Image (cartoon, rainbow, N blue to C red):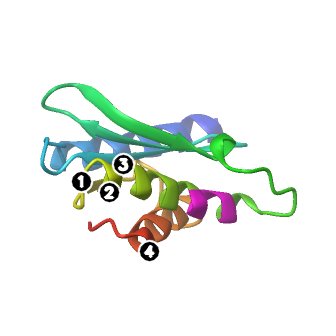
Amino acid sequence: MQVKIKRAKKETRRKRVRAKIIGTAKKPRLNIFRSLTHTYAQVINDLAGKTLFSANDSELKENKKATKIDKAKEVGKLIAAKALAAGIKKVVFDRAGYKYHGRVKAVADGAREAGLEF
């Protein structure tokens, strides 16, 4: 029962966030997905319906002592580097219904440190 309530709350947050943001060619959407073990980020142009590029923590060099939050910050830096290489400096941040703390916040902080603006 508790799992259903948590899922419903997350879905409500996701719908509320997605109703307000949209990615364009000039300012695409930076989307976050986190599973139990990995963190993923995508830069998406919603008008064209295309994912421009993506990054995840399995692309990083393996560091056994790094925590999930450390890896998430590196994913943010990696996706920012890919975006800047393609000439994209501003994005719209989509937390995808996750609360803004932990790994989601770490991805955002890493992307900001690497030069993305949102």
Q: Residues within 10 Å of mark 2 (few under 14, many from 20)?
A: some
Residue 113: mark: 4
The residue labelled by disc 3 is 13
Q: Which residue is mark 2?
A: 84
Is 34 situated left or right of 86 in this image? Answer: right
Q: Could you tell which of marks 3 and 4 lies nearer the N-terminus?
A: 3
User: Which quarter shows the C terminus?
Assistant: bottom left
- Amino acid type, residue under disc 3 in the picture: Arg
| Nearer to me, 16 or 89 | 89
| Residues at marks 1 and 2, CA–CA distance in whole angstroms | 5 Å
Q: How many angstroms separate mark 3 from mark 4 (CA)? A: 26 Å
**Circle nearer the N terminus (4, 2):** 2
Percent across and percent down for residue 79 are 45, 51
Dot 3 falls on a residue whose secondary structure is helix
3D distance between C-alphas at marks 3 and 2: 29 Å
Q: How many marks?
A: 4
Count neighbours of disc 1 (C-alpha within 10 A) and say few if under 14, some if 14 to 19, many if 20 or more: some
Q: Earlier in the sequence, mark 3 or mark 2?
A: 3
Question: Is the C-beta separation of discs 1 and 2 under 8 Å?
Answer: yes
Marks 4 and 2: CB-CB under 8 Å?
no
Instruction: Name the element at disc 2.
Output: helix
Residue 19 in the image: x percent, y percent?
19, 43
- Looking at the rendering, the stretch of residues picked out in magenta corresponds to 70-74
Label 1: state its secondary structure: loop
Q: Main secondary structure of the magenta part?
A: helix
Q: CA distance from mark 1 to mark 3?
A: 27 Å
Q: Which of label 3 and label 4 is nearer to you?
A: 4
- Provide the residue designation for mark 1: 88
Kind of residue at disc 1:
Ile
